[in-house]
Image (spheres, grey):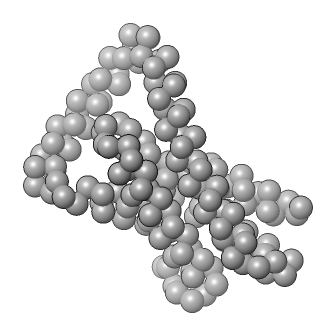
């Protein structure tokens, strides 16, 4: 296995780069090694989707432990209350678009808008887990297709 594929996998599981950093490198690797692009595409997208479950698990377990510390508990509750006030206003006006908003947020192929951030937003806001997971998976797949098409030169992302 070439180091480029390992780097692509590492970039895919990291919070900032995610799919947006790993997929182009994996596609270039596939082209150079004459490997089907479909294989590396599904590998990278699947890894990014699997991270959704890892992140939720981590947040559920670590948060419970950290809530035992008063400074964390006060800080978390302070910011959570601020976020909830803003979200409550938004939900009253746009309650039906939550799924699509989360999906589109994750689908935007920019650093910081992927599965990691989508999971954290869903978790902090206490959104329904099943719907959030489906929205994030859909967003990851859309982002993957956009990155694939952009890397192959079919579309220009910027």
- Side (left or right) of 78 relative to 158: left
Q: Give above or below for 37 relative to 130.
A: below
Quarter of the N terminus within the rendering: bottom right
> Residue 58 occupies which quadrant of the picture?
top right
Viewer-nearest residue: 23 or 16:
23
Where is residue 35? Give x, y as percent.
Answer: 81, 77
Residue at image coords 29%, 30%: 79
> Residue 11 occupies which quadrant of the picture?
bottom right
Viewer-nearest residue: 134 or 106:
134
Where is residue 102? Give x, y as percent.
Answer: 34, 56
Where is residue 40? Give x, y as percent.
Answer: 72, 69
Residue at image coords 49%, 32%: 59
Viewer-nearest residue: 155 or 39:
39
> Residue 4 occupies which quadrant of the picture?
bottom right
Q: Give above or below for 92 relative to 66.
A: below
Residue at image coords 49%, 38%: 56
Q: Give above or below for 65 relative to 158.
A: above
Task: Name the outermost residue toward the right.
Answer: 1
Residue at image coords 57%, 80%: 150
Where is residue 137? Give x, y as percent.
Answer: 47, 59
Visible residue check, residue 112 = no
């Amino acid at each position: 296995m070439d180091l480029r594929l390992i780097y692509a996998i590492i970039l895919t599981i990291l919070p900032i780069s995610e799919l947006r950093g790993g997929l182009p490198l994996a596609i270039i690797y596939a082209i150079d090694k004459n490997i089907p692009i479909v294989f590396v595409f599904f590998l990278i997208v699947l890894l990014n989707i699997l991270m959704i479950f890892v992140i939720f698990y981590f947040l559920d377990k670590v948060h419970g432990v950290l809530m035992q510390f008063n400074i964390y508990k006060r800080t978390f509750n302070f910011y959570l209350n601020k976020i909830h006030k803003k979200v409550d206003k938004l939900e009253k006006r746009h309650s039906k678009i939550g799924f699509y908003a989360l999906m589109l947020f994750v689908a935007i192929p920019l650093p910081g808008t992927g599965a990691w951030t989508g999971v954290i937003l869903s978790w902090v806001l206490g959104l329904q887990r099943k719907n959030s997971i489906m929205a994030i998976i859909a967003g990851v797949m859309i982002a993957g297709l956009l990155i694939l098409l952009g890397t192959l030169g079919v579309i220009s992302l910027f």
